[in-house]
Amino acid sequence: MAMDREELMTFILDHYENPRNYGAREDAQVVKKGGNPGCGDIITIYLKIDDEGLIKEVSFEGEGCILSQAATSMITEMVVGKTVDEVEAMSSEVITDIIGRDLAMTRPRCTTLGISTVKMAIKEWQRKKMLDEIEKEKAL
Ligand code: FES
C-alpha cells in the first residue's frame, strides 16, 4: 500500500537518522566511493560477495543530503541476499518505487547515488575476480 506524504517523510527521515547497514567494513572485498560532483555529497560502499556472486554483506558511510543518505540506506536493505546479476538488472530508478515518482523526479541524482555506486562496486568486484582467474591460470 502506498504511503501518504507524512508517512513517506517519516520513513525517509528514519532512514536518514538511523541509517541501516552503516559503517566501514574492514573485511570488505570492494570499497567504492561515489559522489555527486554538483553538490559534493559522497558515499562509500563496502561489499562482501561470495564465489557464486551472492551479495552477503553490504554497508555504507556517507555525508550529504537527506535523500541521498536515506536512499542509500534503503538500497543496502534491498541488495543484500541478491546476486550481482540481479542487482545489475535493477533499474537506477528502483527507489522511485518506494518514495514515489513526484519526489524522485525532483531529485534524481540524490535518489540514484546509492544504487549507481553499488553497481560500480559490483563492476570492480567482477574486474578483480577476472584478474584473479587470469593469475590462477598463469600459475598452472
Ligand atoms: Fe547532493 Fe542530494 S543534494 S546528493
Image (cartoon, rainbow, N blue to C red):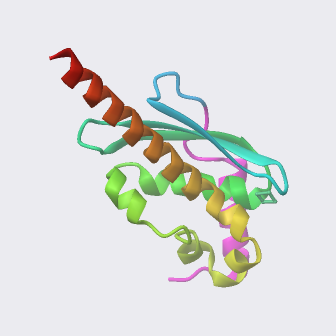
Tell whether 39 sits left or right of 100.
Answer: right
Tell whether 140 sits left or right of 78.
Answer: left
Q: Which x, y percent locates residue 68?
A: 71, 57
Q: Which x, y percent locates residue 12?
A: 68, 63
Tell whether 116 sits left or right of 104.
Answer: left
4 relative to 139, above or below? below
Image quadrant where residue 127 sits: top left
Residue in the picture at 59% in, 29% down: 24
Tell whether 46 sits left or right of 50.
Answer: right
Residue in the picture at 66% in, 65% down: 111
4 relative to 89, above or below? below
Residue in the picture at 32% in, 52% down: 83
Residue 82 visible? The answer is: no
Q: Which x, y percent locates residue 57?
A: 42, 39
Q: Which x, y percent locates residue 123?
A: 45, 46
Look at the image and give the residue range highlighted in magenta: 1-23
Q: Nearer the viewer, residue 11 or 135?
A: 135
Image quadrant where residue 56 sits: top left
Residue at the extreme left: 140
Residue in the picture at 53% in, 27% down: 25
Residue 136 visible? The answer is: yes
